[in-house]
Image (cartoon, rainbow, N blue to C red):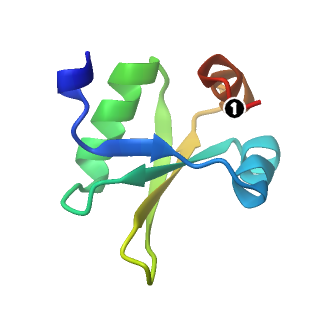
C-alpha cells in the first residue's frame, strides 16, 4: 500500500486543522508539490474509503503545499481522524 501513496506526505494536526474537522468536516494534508486536485482526490478516496466533496490547495511561503479536503456529509472527518490517531 505504501508504494501507491505518491501525493500525500502527511496529515496536518494543528488547532486550525482540528477546528476545520469539527466545524466544517474538513481535513488538511501536506501534499507533494507536483500533485493536483484530481490525483489527491483519487488517492484520499482510495486510501481512506471516503467520498471527497471539494479540495482547496494552499501554497505556503515556506514551500509546503496544503490540500484542505472537504468530505461529503455521509463521511465524518472526526471519525477518520480518530482512526488515524489524531484525536
| Quadrant in which the N terminus appears | top left
Q: Is residue 82 above or below residue 24?
A: above
In x, y percent, where is residue 29?
Answer: 48, 48
Picture residue at 81% right of the left edge, 42% below the top: 22
| Residue in the image at 29% along x and 34% along y | 42
Farthest bottom residue in view? 61
The picture places residue 31, in percent across and down from the top left corner, at 36, 52
Residue at horizontal 57 percent and vertical 37 percent from the top: 71
- In the structure shown, which secondary structural element does the residue marked by tag 1 occupy? loop
Q: Residue 46 occupies which quadrant of the picture?
A: top left
Query: Residue 38 appears at what percent x and percent y?
Result: 26, 47
Q: Is residue 36 above or below residue 53?
A: below
Q: Nearer the viewer, residue 35 or 24?
A: 35
Residue lying furthest front? 62
Q: Front-most of 40 and 6?
A: 6
Front residue of this view, candidates 32 and 25: 32
Q: Residues within 10 Å of mark 1 (few under 14, many from 20)?
A: some
Pointer 1: what residue? Answer: 86
Amino acid at each position: 500500500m505504501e508504494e501507491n501513496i505518491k501525493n500525500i506526505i502527511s496529515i496536518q494536526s494543528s488547532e486550525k486543522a482540528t477546528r476545520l474537522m469539527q466545524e466544517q468536516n474538513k481535513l488538511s494534508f501536506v501534499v507533494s508539490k507536483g500533485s493536483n486536485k484530481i490525483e489527491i482526490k483519487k488517492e484520499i478516496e482510495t486510501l481512506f474509503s471516503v467520498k471527497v466533496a471539494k479540495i482547496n490547495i494552499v501554497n505556503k511561503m515556506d514551500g509546503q503545499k496544503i490540500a484542505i479536503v472537504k468530505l461529503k456529509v455521509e463521511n465524518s472527518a472526526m471519525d477518520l481522524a480518530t482512526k488515524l490517531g489524531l484525536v
